[in-house]
Image: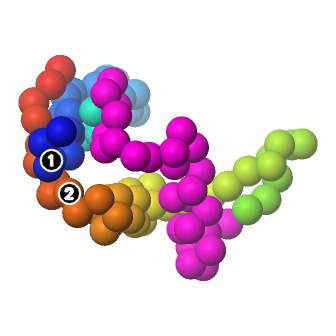
Amino acid sequence: MPNIWRVRRYEVPFAANTGVQWRMVEEFETSLPVVAGLDDDYFATIVEAFLAGGAGSRGTIGDAASVLVDANAITAFAVKWLETRFNYAHQAISGR
């Protein structure tokens, strides 16, 4: 497997007071494994590590156990977590 992250960038419609606004979004390409060797529940592992560091919060919404995290903060944390463990560099690919 090449030593890169696969990132997709594409436009999606968002509802706004003025109507539909198209915005660029970015996400990891997950149709193939990000890297070999990750547990099936690695997202949960990353979130637990993030929470253990004092970021985010736990609570309930209705009867459901819930976690609230800042999207930018958890993304940066997750990228660093993966890069540190797998020594991978971040490289973008196009997609729509």
Q: Residues within 10 Å of mark 2 (few under 14, many from 20)?
A: some
- Residue at x 16% of width, y 54% of height: 90
In screen coordinates, is 94 left or right of 30? left
Q: Which residue is mark 2?
A: 88
- Residue at x 40% of width, y 46% of height: 37
Q: Residues within 10 Å of mark 1 (few under 14, many from 20)?
A: some
In screen coordinates, is 3 left or right of 71? left
* Residue type at the position of mark 2: Tyr
Residue 41, picture quadrant:
top right
- Residue at x 51% of width, y 45% of height: 39
Which residue is more in the foreground, 71 or 16?
A: 71
Does residue 77 appear in this view? yes
Give percent across and percent down for residue 71. 44, 55
Q: Which residue is mark 1?
A: 4
- Marks 1/2 in contact by CB < 8 Å: the verdict is yes
Instruction: Kindly state the secondary structure of the residue where label 2 is placed.
Output: loop
Does residue 27 appear in this view? no
Give percent across and percent down for residue 75. 38, 57
Marking on residue 49: none
Which residue is more in the foreground, 17 or 91?
A: 91
Instruction: Kindly state the secondary structure of the residue where label 1 is placed.
Output: strand
Give the residue at the far bottom of this rendering.
54
* Residue type at the position of mark 1: Ile
